[in-house]
Image (cartoon, grey):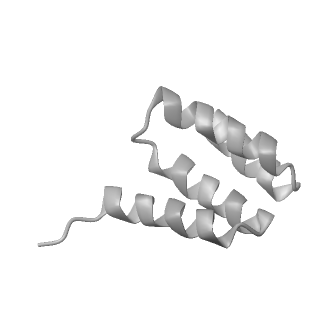
Amino acid sequence: MMRTLKGNFLSLIRKFPEAQATLDEVLKMDPQINVARYFKGLAYNRAGDKKMAAATFQAVTLKTCTIA
């Protein structure tokens, strides 16, 4: 959890490549940590990469929601 929060913090202080790398490490260890995927989407959004942000947010939505 601490690395996930570190990734978000790095994004907040505009260190986007470091944030994305940190969050990638978290997701490599456990791809089911959707909060890391969400924070990665925020990092892309903050960096101005709206296309990657949308794709990342969509991945979070698809992994956490079920359609009945």
Residue 16: x and y in percent read 80, 51
| Residue 47 quadrant | bottom right
Q: Residue furthest front?
A: 51
Q: Residue furthest left?
A: 68
Q: Is residue 1 visible?
A: no
Total numbered labels placed on residues in the image = 0
Q: Is residue 15 above or below residue 28?
A: below
Give me the residue at 42% from left, 59% from top.
59
Q: Is residue 38 above or below residue 22?
A: below
Q: Is residue 25 left or right of residue 28?
A: right
Q: Is residue 22 above or below residue 65?
A: above
Give me the residue at 87% from left, 56% from top.
14
Q: Quadrant of the N terminus?
A: top right
Q: Is residue 10 above or below residue 55?
A: above
Q: Is residue 47 visible?
A: yes
Instruction: Out of 62 and 12, give the one closest to the viewer.
Output: 62
Give me the residue at 60% from left, 62% from top.
52
